[in-house]
Amino acid sequence: MPRFSVIVPAYRVQAYLHSCLESVLGQSYADLELIAVDDGSPDRCGAIIEEFAARDPRVRAVHLDRNTGLGPARNAGMEQASGDYLIFLDGDDTLTPHALRAVAERLERTGDPDVLVYDYARLHLDGGIVRNRLAAELGEEGPAPFRLDDRPGLLNLLMVVWNKAYRRAFLEREDLRFPPGCYEDIPFTYPALLAAGSLATLDRVCLHYRQRRLGNILGTPGRQHFDVFAQYDRVFAFLDARPALAHWRGPLFQRMTDHCFTVLSRADRLPPGSHREFLRRARAQHLRRRVPGLRPATWRESARHLVIRSGSPRLWRLLRLTLVASRRTAHLARAAARAARAALLRLHYATQRLLPPRDLALFTAGGGTAAHGGDPGALETAFRVWAPRTRTAWAAPRALAGTVPPDTLHLTPGGLAWWTALARARYLVTDTGFGTPVRTRRGQILLRTADGLPLTRAGLDAARPDVPAVLADADSWDLCLSGDAHTTLVHERGYPGRYTILEFGRPRTDVYQRATPEDVRRARALLGVPHGRTAVLYAPARRPAPAPTLDVEELARRLGEHFVLLTTVPDPGTYPAGRVIDVCATAAPQTALCLAADVLVTDGSPLVADFAALDRPVVAWGPDRAALDAAGGLYPVEVPGPVAADRAALARLLATGACDGPAFAELRAAFRERHCPYDDGRVAERVVRRVVLGERSGLPAVTPPAARRPVPSAVPVVASAPGPAALPAARSTAGYGLAEQR
């Protein structure tokens, strides 16, 4: 008996069925059977199912003589199922990686409830993934399992069958089956939730719901949409047979009314000329099922009830026109307000530029979207220490105001005070711009910093660059801060301009030389890193494409309980607690990530220089690095560590500590000499004394890399294997880049 029976009905989905079935068979949790039902499909669905059945014994093919519809096809799959739990998956949707493992673990933690509800995300035509907006209903806080009375908000979720795992014995006891017709999920999912003796939730995206342009039966106009009445009749018949569930009549009546109004109002549902009939039948059902004393919660709900209860097509058209008019009026009003505000701000900015500059320094990172940190953050701190007469301000969204130091003025990008500062600040400091074109005036200095060590091609060196935009950006710079000779060459070639390059180092690395073990413990606590675990930071380079391929959950399982992965790749769902931490969900600066991490895994992230300054191990993920090089190009820079050619090699390098052997320690030392020559803990001081105080001599001498003592990691990686020569699946990174370099 397998743990899961995954039932996939297929009808006219040959373009998507391969992906669907592969998403099931490729799960890291393999205790399953896949029951694929060919619902008399006229295309190649049946042949595709047979191909999968021939290659994998876990696949059971079911062929129906004729097209019966989604409900009967699922019933046919249920008759063949033998698993503990049933999971339903439509033939054009897919399970997310490790979804079944997450479901299995949650079932075990909650004592095998009757129904487990998990989350989904919509997969749009452009590849965008948008999580369910009601995901908050799936929080795992509080006791579990529970009854629906304890969490009635679950009824607000999309009432579909494919976002739940059902205990097969429970379905058989309640004799739950799918009826024929459209909206067949309604009389299955509502009774399942109402009758379940135990429920649990999983706050994780386990399914991608494909948004198709054509072929979706709910988006095809026709008489099948009248089936909604019979399906809700079945739900209320279920309630009638169970007096103990009578208190759910009100919420279900509200859901029925909203659903009927949605079917009535959507342009892709009812065929032309049928709205009057649909409204007449909706009125009859509304009057038959209404609950005395029930009051709608909002005016919109009241309007919907009024339309359905009246059965008047004229009132429905009037309400629809009213709603459309109100939306359009609100849209036009907002657009006019935005245009007026933008015009006033432009006028204010132009007026402020006529006034003399203020002794103010405006800082920002990430185009005004990032927290206080990076090179601009380190320079802002140094301004307050070495140039206290110059007031400092940091531009960031209100949500990140808590990251701004108390003595620093916080400005919201786009606000009146921000435009004033942009026009009159004597110093403008940024790493990626201010989110709007800036033309400095006489008496202003714009200092541009770099985001770490540039490894991916940038500026005019990038594939298909926007030449006018790159040149306009470079023309706005007065000074450009560089960390090493390589960065200087990248800026001169990729961003040609009349600015002056200051090759002084990277200010954000100062903290690594001054930090204490207590600072490391504080950074790990901020990110939630468990005590005593080796923290592996996975930070791929930013890129539009190709997407990173490293499966962090699989790597975490390979490494075991003594490791935790910190990932900068955002996930629409949630990573498993205690194994993977999505650091994108925190406001922690990059310096805190590096202090907390013991090892860096990357393909071409600028954080390589940070880890070199910390003298901590770096591992290059070869497949993504090669793809990144092929797509956009990498500068020929040696990464101070081994290259993992596959997942097994990567796990072995980390688990054995071989990534920190003597050979790689020498690579890191050579890397620091080339790319971290000035990062001795006093970079920001030198920059402020040179730029603000005007000192050209007498600046602090640079401490040689060999004499520096950065703060050690919390859990040092101990090499238990020789260097890269003894590891055939991994190799040194010497010469690994755009061109071979010896």
Image (cartoon, helix red, strand yellow):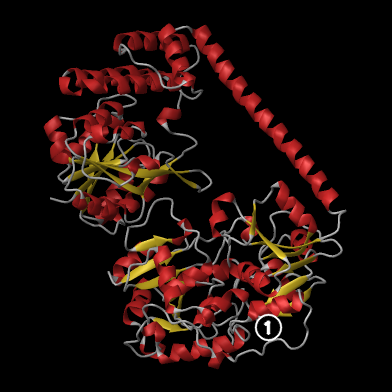
Residue 93 location, quadrant:
top left
Residue shown at 65% from the left, 76% from the top: 684
In the picture, which quadrant includes the C terminus?
bottom right
Residue 548 visible to the viewer: yes
Residue 290 percent coordinates (x, y)? 32, 12
175 vs 551: above or below: above
The number of numbered badges drawn on the structure is 1
Q: Position of residue 180 (x, y in %)?
A: 27, 25
Q: Residue at x 38, y 9 (%)?
A: 283
Q: Is residue 282 above or below residue 723?
A: above
Q: Is residue 728 visible?
A: no
Q: Is residue 211 above or below residue 266?
A: below
User: Horizontally, is 308 left or right of 288 in the view?
Assistant: right
Q: Is residue 381 left or right of residue 10?
A: right
SS category of the residue bearing label 1:
helix
Q: Position of residue 543 (x, y in %)?
A: 56, 62
Name the residue nearer the viewer: 624 or 559: 559
Instruction: Residue under label 1, please give it.
Output: 485
Q: From the viewer's perspective, is 547 left or right of 119? A: right
The amino acid pointed to by label 1 is Ala
- Where residue 490 appears, x then y in whole percent? 69, 75
Q: Residues within 10 Å of mark 1 (few under 14, many from 20)?
A: some
Is 558 or 725 nearer to us in this picture? Answer: 558
